[in-house]
Every structure is written in structure tokens, then in C-alpha cells.
């Protein structure tokens, strides 16, 4: 089977599996006895972020780190997201860090995100996982030579059709770094294409379905379709996300549960996440 036929098959498979994660929405689990003055009060979470504006700071606790169908670590993770954005919300840049409670998992990323118009977003991430058990270069933080670096640059575009039809389409490609062939001679340009849809959005709960395919734009014959996300091309991530926000007075605690299956890796995982602030 040539590359064109294989690519068509991937897209056909993907097209038939898109009844289908936009990031979880938050919900008001309000006390029925709450009076009108209390209802109009902003949450402590909102006030905290407003005080920081135009900067932002978020903290998250997760039972594991699940990323695009890959279990990056099975240990409990505390993640930090911090940065600065423009007043119109179109551009922001920041850093993201994740640290496992066992001391093995460590990650430090940079990113820039640009939304020129409503529903369209471009993002560039510099991702560096320097965990102690890494099989790639996890010691040279400033090494960016393609055949030596432990970093990888991920370029993506996301588009939501409309408010009435909130189908989200997402494409990302690894454009540089540790996404190499067997001989470490070229970049595979591994790509991840996802469709997602919020099927339930209510005050009590939300539910998003998603499906994603992965493949290499510049694969090697001997790799048999191997890419950054798995040993072959095909469905890399299929699942759902359930989200809910718990209210403790004026403090809100959004929680999400993500169930993910990766057919190309013959694996499945469940992640529980708490957005602390």
C-alpha cells in the first residue's frame, strides 16, 4: 500500500468516527437557598485571576498525565500554567510545568497562542520532558539540534464551526525535535488530527466526545507508519471527558474525568483532574 492510499484510509477512518474534547466547561452547582446577592457575587477563582491580569496563574492536580492518548506518567502530577495575555484575549504566551509526586516525571514547556478571529486558534509549543527515566536527551536543556535535542516543537491549529454547531477540528504537527526515524536522519513530522463535540452542556455536568488519528507526513518504509504517538498510523485517541464544578461557598473546584483509548497502542487510561486555581 503506498503512502497516498494509506493516508486516505486514515482520513476515511477518522471521518467515520467523529460523533466525537473541547476543554471542559465549568458549571454552577448552586445552593437553592442562595439569595440573589450571593448569586451576583463573583467567585474567588475569578477575583484571583482578575487581580493578576494581564498575567495569569493556574494550578492543577491530576491522578496521572494523559496527553493525546499517551500516558506520559502514571504518577500523580501537580501542574502549573503561568503567562501573560493581551487585553483583547487574542494573544498569550506562557510556561507550563508538570511534576510527578514520585520525583521521576518532570516537564517544562513554553508556548504562544494566537486567536486572530473567533473560533480560530494557532498554537506553538516547545515541549521538554526531562524525566529521570527518559530514553531521549534529558540533560541538555538548551540543546536544540534536531538529532540531539530532547525538546520537540508542536505547531497546531484549532477551529470550531460555530456556536450552534460547536464541532471542534484540531490539527497538530511536530515540526522539530525528537520525532525522528530509525536512523535519526530526518524528522517524521508526526501529525495528530482530532474532532470533538460537546454533547451535553448543563448546569449539572458536561460531556465531550472526541476521536483522533495520528500519522507521519514523512514516514520511513522500515518504520511501517511509526509516528510520535504510536507504532503505526491510525486511531490514536478515542474517548470522552466528563466535567463538573463543585462550589464551596465562593470557591469553585472544577473537576474532569477523562477516559481514553488508543487503538494503535492497544491501551486505555482514565485521568481525574482538579483545577485548584
Image (cartoon, grey):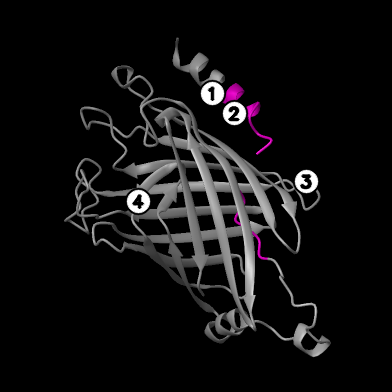
Instruction: Return the mark for residue 136.
Output: none
The residue under label 4 is 74
Give the side of residue 147 with respect to residue 53, left or right: left
Does dot 2 land on a helix, a strand or a loop? helix
Callout 3 crowding tier (Cα within 10 Å): few <14, some 14–19, many ≥20: few
Q: Residue at x 28, y 42 (%)?
A: 178
Mark 2 vs 4, N-terminal side: 2
Circle 1/circle 2 CB separation < 8 Å = yes
Mark 4 vs 3, N-terminal side: 4
Mark 4 vs 1, N-terminal side: 1
Q: Nearer the viewer, residue 181 or 65?
A: 65
Does dot 1 land on a helix, a strand or a loop? helix
Give the side of residue 231 with respect to residue 276, left or right: left
Mark 2 vs 3, N-terminal side: 2
Q: Residue at x 53, y 50 (%)?
A: 258
The residue under label 3 is 165
Image spot of residue 10 (x, y percent): 53, 23
The residue under label 2 is 14
The residue under label 1 is 10
Locate the N terminus and report the quarter of the image it occupies: top left
Outermost residue, left side? 139
Tell me if residue 214 comes above or below residue 114 in the rendering: above
Amino acid at each position: 500500500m503506498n503512502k497516498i492510499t494509506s493516508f486516505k484510509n486514515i482520513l476515511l477512518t477518522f471521518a467515520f468516527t467523529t460523533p466525537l474534547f473541547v476543554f471542559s466547561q465549568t458549571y454552577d452547582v448552586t445552593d437553592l437557598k442562595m439569595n440573589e446577592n450571593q448569586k451576583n457575587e463573583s467567585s474567588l477563582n475569578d477575583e484571583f485571576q482578575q487581580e493578576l491580569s494581564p498575567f495569569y496563574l493556574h494550578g492543577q492536580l491530576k491522578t496521572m498525565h494523559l496527553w493525546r492518548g499517551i500516558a506520559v506518567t502514571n504518577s500523580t502530577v501537580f501542574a502549573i500554567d503561568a503567562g501573560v495575555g493581551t487585553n483583547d484575549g487574542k494573544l498569550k504566551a506562557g510556561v507550563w510545568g508538570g511534576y510527578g509526586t514520585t520525583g521521576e516525571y518532570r516537564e517544562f514547556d513554553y508556548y504562544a497562542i494566537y486567536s486572530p478571529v473567533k473560533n480560530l486558534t494557532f498554537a506553538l509549543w516547545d515541549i521538554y520532558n526531562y524525566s529521570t527515566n527518559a530514553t531521549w536527551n534529558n540533560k541538555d536543556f538548551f540543546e536544540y539540534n534536531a538529532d540531539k535535542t530532547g525538546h520537540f516543537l508542536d505547531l497546531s491549529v484549532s477551529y470550531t464551526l460555530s456556536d450552534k454547531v460547536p464541532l471542534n477540528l484540531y490539527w497538530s504537527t511536530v515540526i522539530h525535535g525528537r520525532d525522528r526515524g530509525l536512523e535519526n536522519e530526518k524528522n517524521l513530522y508526526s501529525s495528530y488530527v482530532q474532532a470533538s463535540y460537546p454533547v451535553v452542556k448543563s448546569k449539572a455536568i458536561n460531556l465531550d466526545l472526541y476521536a483522533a488519528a495520528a500519522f507521519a507526513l514523512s514516514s520511513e518504509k522500515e518504520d511501517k507508519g511509526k509516528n510520535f504517538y504510536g507504532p503505526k498510523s491510525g486511531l490514536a485517541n478515542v474517548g470522552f471527558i466528563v466535567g463538573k464544578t463543585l462550589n464551596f461557598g465562593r470557591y469553585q473546584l472544577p473537576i474532569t474525568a477523562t477516559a481514553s483509548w488508543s487503538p494503535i497502542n492497544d491501551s486505555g487510561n482514565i485521568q481525574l483532574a482538579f483545577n485548584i486555581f
